[in-house]
Image: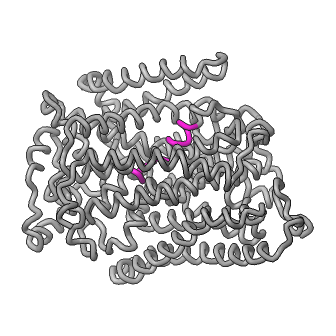
Amino acid sequence: MDFLNGVNALTLVFIALLVFAIAYRFYGIFLANKVLKLNAANVTPAIEFSDGKDYVATNRTVLFGHHFAAIAAAGPLVGPVLAAQFGYLPGALWILIGCVLGGGVHDMVVLFASVRHKGESLATIARKEIGTGTGLIAGIAILFILVLTLAGLSLACISAMHEASWSLFTVIATMPIAVIMGLIMRYRKDSVTLASIFGGIMLIAAIVGGHELMQIPALSHIFHWKIETISIAITVYGFLASVLPVWLLLVPRDYLSTYLKIGTILMLTIGVIFVHPTLQMPALTQFVSGGGPVIGGPVLPFIFIVIACGAISGFHAIIATGTTPKMLTNEKEILFVGYGAMLVEGFVALMALIAACTLVPGDYFAINTPKEMYESFIAQNPGLKAVDLAHFSEKIGVELQGRTGGAVSLAVGMAHIFNKIPYMDDVMAYWYNFAIMFEAVFILTAIDAGTRVGRFFLQEMIGRVIPRFKDKNWIPGIIISSLLFTFSWGYLVYTGNVSSIWPLFGISNQLLAACGLIVCTTMLIRMNRKKYALCAAIPGVFMALITFWAGYEQVVNMYMPKGQYLLAFLACIAMVLMFVVFVNTFKRWYQLSKMKADKVDYYGDAVKELVER
């Protein structure tokens, strides 16, 4: 394995670009033409149910920006950084293989199923394709997972922005800029280019000008918010993003954020090309068998759980059956929006992994090991002492040791790469704060879309008891369901309790990814595509098995020995709910395999037998 150590980062970038380009050109088109048989003649929900609020036909480039911004939250940034504990090789392999054969397939198939089901949620798709009981259980499980996801993402964002005036100012500035962009695109014909130019210029002005403005003490004090204030502000933002028309705030802000996200990743890529740093982290570390300070478990199965977004993620199913299918203008665009955005996210994840692995291992572990554990860690691993961390702390002006969670080590890694460019040493603090703000924007764009999707879920579920809630245009229903859902995750954010159950999100998220693939496989089987359905069934079953394995390891070897019985209980609940969904789905596969072809409604929403029932 020695030949894999000391690899130039540029080699990994080149391999990733080559793999993703080939995957899109061949496998993506195969999925579109053979597996899903996308048809531009089919009327999409955005056209059929156009209401100017949720169902809005959207330019495909703008929609790509929204979808990418919504799915690319903390996962593709933080997960690969944490997984660097095992070495760069396990994470790189899982990102490349998982993204092409798992995540891209998942996003395309789930988006396709929602479009064919009139923009409905994954729970409703499960109810129609499998049965009422399965749909109800799936709905409960999805809401449970979504609340945990948004609370966890919000806490990660708060930890990056609290008492950081410049970062907070830039994030807040994206909101009025986005509203103006939304108004331009709404009321001026063919104005996407104009809005894009305006948004790009204003975003650069906010980033650069914000740094200078925050040097003024009075202004800096205004944006120097404590954790409690930001907790309330994020909750209010989530509520507003869920009730305002998508064209006014959510879509243009996500589109604007995409400039920053993709622009930053391109800058990081150019930095790697210019600096061509060596990966300091070995291919495999001594922690692949477990016992590491960042992740306690072994590389198998935990690599599949730690790196979710960037390889495959159940959160994507929430977006792909939430906002995106209600804005798709042409069914053929599922390839570009679904598979294309997933590949871009995979590249983001790989660049995050590279940024972390260019740090000296001692510096990486000094940042990601809790302060109270550091001395014992060094005593057991004397070869992993910090090397350049004191220099970084001095240049940045922040004590970096013991800042666990992945975000800080990613920011330091990015600043470290940019710092190697001539004349950049004196602006390392700028790059560090820019990277922190960049991560916060990633997270916020998932919070706004996720909250809106949660509102859709609640409206559907309450609508079964109070039919009026099914009316997506009924203002009281929109406000009540938005308040209930926003409060559910906002309360957890304010109390901070969810921060201790972040590992539970990894298990729940990947179970949801398996659920999306397995449920949508049912639809493909119903549509007489049994052979092609294997493209979704194989990664779905694999993710189910590997996640149950990881869940067992987490409960038995980590939660229970530490007395974390509540976390163990919640993990078991998530696994039991999904196990019931999987069993019922497999039964449905067997039933469909026995049905004659003439009993299958190829383009409709249900099998004749289901309609009769």
In-image side of 497 versus 178 (left or right): left
Q: Position of residue 419 (x, y in %)?
A: 17, 36
Q: Position of residue 417 (x, y in %)?
A: 21, 40
In-image side of 296 versus 342 (left or right): left
Q: Position of residue 298 (x, y in %)?
A: 32, 74
Q: Is residue 225 above or below residue 460?
A: above
Q: Quadrant of the C terminus?
A: bottom right
Q: Residue at point 78% right, 69% down? A: 132
Q: Is residue 563 above or below residue 613?
A: below
Q: Quadrant of the N terminus?
A: bottom left
**Relative depth, front residue between 393 and 127:** 127
Task: Inspect this view and state whether residue 232 appears.
Answer: no
Q: Residue at point 68% right, 66% down? A: 531
Question: In the image as oriented, which residue stretches furthest toward the right?
Answer: 612
Q: Is residue 462 magenta?
A: no
Q: Residue at point 80% right, 46% down? A: 471
Q: Which residues are magenta?
A: 64-76
Q: Is residue 138 above or below residue 54?
A: below
Q: Position of residue 465 (x, y in %)?
A: 80, 61
Task: Inspect this view and state whether residue 514 appears.
Answer: yes
**Relative depth, front residue between 331 and 16:** 16
Among the 4 quarters of the image, the one containing residue 476: top right
In-image side of 391 versus 74 (left or right): left
What's the magenta bit mostly, secondary-structure-wise?
Answer: helix
Q: Is residue 325 above or below residue 47?
A: below
Q: Is residue 75 magenta?
A: yes
**Relative depth, front residue between 101 and 588:** 101
In-image side of 192 versus 504 (left or right): right
Query: What is the tally of numbered marks visible in this picture?
Result: 0
Among the 4 quarters of the image, the one containing residue 475: top right
